[in-house]
Image (cartoon, rainbow, N blue to C red):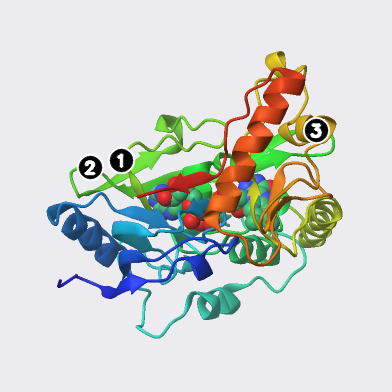
Amino acid sequence: MLWPCASLPNADLKGRTTLRVGGPVEWLLEPANPDELRKAIVAAREAGFVPRLLGGGANVVIDDVGLPGVVIATDRLNRVFRPPSGPSLDGAPTGADAGAAALLDELLPSSQMAPPDPSWDPRLIAWAGAPLPKLCRAARDLGYSGLEKMAGVPGHLGGGIAMNAGGKSPDGTLWQMSDVVDMIRVVGADGQFQDILRADWAPEYRDGRLGDGIVVGAVLSFEPRPKAQVIEDSKEYLRRKNAVQPVTEWSAGCVFKNPDPELSGGKTAGLLVDEAGGKGRRHGGAEISERHGNFLVNRGEATAADVFGLIEEIQALVAEKAGVVLEPEVKIWRS
Ligand SMILES: Cc1cc2nc3c(=O)[nH]c(=O)nc-3n(C[C@H](O)[C@H](O)[C@H](O)COP(=O)(O)OP(=O)(O)OC[C@H]3O[C@@H](n4cnc5c(N)ncnc54)[C@H](O)[C@@H]3O)c2cc1C
């Protein structure tokens, strides 16, 4: 098969997920710029496949038997730019060798404080494969506020937008990816680029509601703040996350969505699992973390079958004890 970008037949996917389970895919495509991504999507569809998009693999569970068809990985779409002198979403950075990191270093403000210049433009442009931690660092180092609470969330920008990644602060404030997104460029069902403006985007809880749209990149918009405060808050959110989640173990983040508070009496999925006695339950190498009831961890040799079995067991347990049906937040990829 001839593809318009780098490709691998029978490619391992397990090592590309943070849970480390799953079989290979028939074809893995690795576009290196937005136009290659668009062409890869079109080529996969013309070959009769519905391509699946894989970002950082931080929220997917892939079946042990693997997948037919095409997975498109966004690893090579790892670019972050500042607007005025950076390139547009359409092409490669100015100067073929100009890496995004170098571009950012060059343009970093030297002051600790946000520059007073009214023409100052606190936005970043990023391609779909830009890692969320890299975006957090870039914003933080520029004194741009908006991604502090995202500190420690793995994955790529495209996956973050598709999942509308987010959480709840200790003070109860909800935050999500859509807070900082100004515009998203997607490849639509017609195989063409389309821009979705913030005003026309209606994401929901853990669902970017993009339909057939595949994220190519986005423009992110921030609030200016003293850099020292942005750094301090980022560290604090990271510290809190590390204190309550098993972040050094193999997992896919929260397994279940938080249920409707009216049905659960305001209890989170993690609390419901904990109260039902789910913590520490095991299926083969898959275990519900003792640290956080909504984290399913791979103890080393877990298979996807172990993970699916444990998810079903926990759903039945919580339904029996609390009368609440938990819906998976993780995306399950079966053939
Ligand atoms: C330790 C840990 C902590 C976590 N903490 C949080 C948290 O605090 N809050 C939170 O919300 N999540 C959290 N997660 C889950 C995960 O980080 C987020 O869901 C993240 O946004 C997933 O991004 P990804 O690139 O890894 O997506 P993937 O797992 O690769 O994909 C997830 C979904 O997005 C789709 N997708 C990926 N790229 C694109 C694209 N370019 N266009 C269209 N669709 C695409 C995939 O097809 C799939 O359906 C955590 C995970 C871990 C392992």
x%, y% of residue 167? 69, 40
Q: Is residue 62 left or right of residue 335?
A: right
Disc 1: which residue: 212
Q: Is mark 2 within 8 Å of ligand 1?
A: no
Which residue does the image show at 40% across and 31% down from the upper left? 200
Residue 147 against residue 311 in the figure, above or below: below
x%, y% of residue 245? 79, 52
Which residue does the image show at 48% across and 46% down from the upper left? 332
Q: Is residue 48 left or right of residue 274?
A: left
Q: Amino acid at mark 1?
A: Asp
Q: Which mark is residue 189?
A: 2
The answer to which image quadrant residue 183 occupies is top left
Which of these two is toward me, 140 or 191?
A: 191
Disc 3: which residue: 271
- Secondary structure beneath label 1: loop
x%, y% of residue 34? 31, 63
